[in-house]
Image (spheres, rainbow, N blue to C red):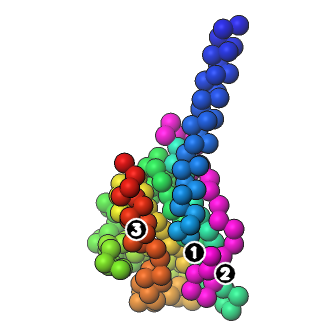
Amino acid sequence: MRIGYRVVLACLLVLASLGGAALDCKVWLPLLPQDFDDMLGDEALVYQAGLSKPKAACVARREYISPKSLRKATIMILQGENSESWGYYDIERLLVVGKVPNVTWESVSGYKILLHMWVESQSYPARNYMVFSPKEGFFLRLDLESPGEQPAVAKQEMLRLGELLPLAKFAAECAKIR
């Protein structure tokens, strides 16, 4: 009987810790703008990014769509290193930047960001993204998808959109967290 109680208690502790991580990401919701450039935002979401990991990561995310064009964007803030998204960022940062012409380090609002410019293929629409990580374990990512355009947008347009991101506020909030 004691073993049964221990199992139930352990399950409750695991679920509580996962819920706590999701609550932590709610602090990022005010940083996700309601609208972005000419795109209208939908409801912001918070969810777990690494349920199979002992220290689960969480994500705050909002998607945007332009009523005038087919352009779509997503702004995502990830907290915690234990997720597939963080692993992809590390791999690109360490292995790809400088070796592939469409992945570069750029400066936006005085911050260093990773910029990846994709071109359209038969399987995927043209899309670009930029990633800003002011502190280990935290990153803000902007994905932009523009079906029918090659590349999705010019590099200068992507950098202009980066200027609209709350990079300074995000960096300041990350600095407050231990």
Measured in 3D between alpha carbons, the distance from the residue under mark 1 to the one under mark 2, in whole angstroms, is 10 Å
Residue indicated by mark 3: 132
Q: In which quadrant is the N terminus drawn?
A: top right
Sequence-first disc among 2 and 3: 2
Seen in the picture, residue 53 relative to 67 is either above or below; the reply is above
Within-10-Å neighbours for mark 1: few <14, some 14–19, many 20+: some
Q: Is residue 112 left or right of residue 121?
A: left
Residue at 38% across, 65% down: 171
Q: Identify the mark nearer the N-term, 1 or 2.
A: 1
Read off the residue under disc 2.
40
Closest to the camera, between mark 1 and mark 3, is 1
The residue segment tinted magenta is 33-55
x and y percentages locating residue 176 in the rendered image:
38, 55
Q: Which mark is residue 33?
A: 1
Q: Tell me the tag on residue 9.
A: none
| Disc 1 from disc 3: Cα separation | 16 Å
Distance between mark 2 and mark 3 Cα atoms: 22 Å
- Mark 1 residue element: loop
